[in-house]
Image: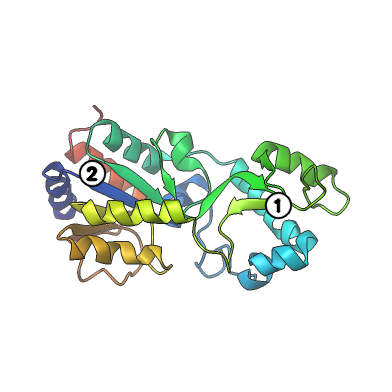
Amino acid sequence: MSDGVETLAAAIASADRVVALTGAGISVPSGIPDFRTPGTGLWANVDPMEVAHIDAWRSDPARFWGFYSRRLASLGEVAPNDAHRALVTMQESGHLHAVVTQNVDRLHRAAGTRDPIEVHGSIATASCLACGGRAELERVLVMIDEADDGVPRCNCGQPLKPDVVLFGEFLPEEALERAYALAAVADVLLCIGTSLEVYPIAQLPDITASAGGEVALVTIGPTAWDDRALVKLDGDVVDELHALVDALGGAP
């Protein structure tokens, strides 16, 4: 067991509130590419402002869904990995108070995390901005297959929009407020698989540190917090979280 794992485990064991903030890196072992890795990242070969912006959905829903339907189909087929399950173990043992995630893949919920705060929304549903109608992911995928133009539509005839935060949209206010409030009371903010580059969520470590809490990193690649964090674990996310759970005493 590394010194970093022991240091982090000791901090978590003595904390009243530990909050996890997760990004794309926690889902990579499930087979989901991250966003920015050259050659393999989701945005490596496409301009997100052209295909994943709210204006793209409004102006050309067929092109938008041509890109996004492939993402929905791929995400719908993946399963949680042992990193997701490690956080469930920590929550069940009382070592983890809450999970805030930037991911839209539903994997924290599928793993059994209680009430994950999905600040970028979720692929679980798609909604009609005209009448408020909503459809579950499985139904949306059927609509895409059945539509001549590949656009899933509400019963009112308007295109559906996935319930994820697209470029050009604000984060859901309730989820953002909950994330801020949790960061402010966290004794330890455990940042997992995130580069801490995407705002406003990248502000959470500052909120925790300003309130007297510690920031810890479990992520590969540089972040702005590398020199300020209590500890940085930069190995495989599954291995690091397994080691952390073991150091905390394992399953409840």
Most extreme residue toward the front is 131
Dot placed on the residue nearer the N-terminal end, 1 or 2: 1
Q: Residue at x 57, y 68 (%)?
A: 39
Q: Position of residue 64 (x, y in %)?
A: 72, 61
| Viewer-nearest residue: 249 or 228 | 228
Q: Position of residue 125 (x, y in %)?
A: 62, 43
Kind of residue at disc 1 = Ser
Disc 2 secondary structure class: helix
Asked whether, in this view, residue 149 is left or right of residue 18, the answer is right
Q: Position of residue 93 (x, y in %)?
A: 24, 31
Q: Give the number of the disc on residue 170.
A: none
Horizontal side, residue 171 vs residue 145: left or right = left
Q: Is residue 68 left or right of residue 152?
A: left
Q: CA distance from mark 1 to mark 2?
A: 37 Å
Q: Is residue 23 above or below residue 154?
A: below
Residue at 33% x, 69% y is 223
Task: State yes or no: discs 1 and 2 in contact (Cβ < 8 Å).
Answer: no
On screen, residue 206 above or below 141: below
| Residue shown at 46% from the left, 48% from the top | 29
**Residue picked out by circle 2:** 244
* Residue position marked by numbered label 1 in the rendering: 69
Numbered disc 1: secondary structure:
helix
- Of residues 249 and 196, the one nearer the viewer is 196
- Amino acid type shown at disc 2: Leu
> Is there any visible trace of residue 238 in the rendered image?
no
Residue at position x 20%, y 69% in the image: 228
For the question of whether residue 49 can be seen, the reply is yes
Q: 66 left or right of 73?
A: right
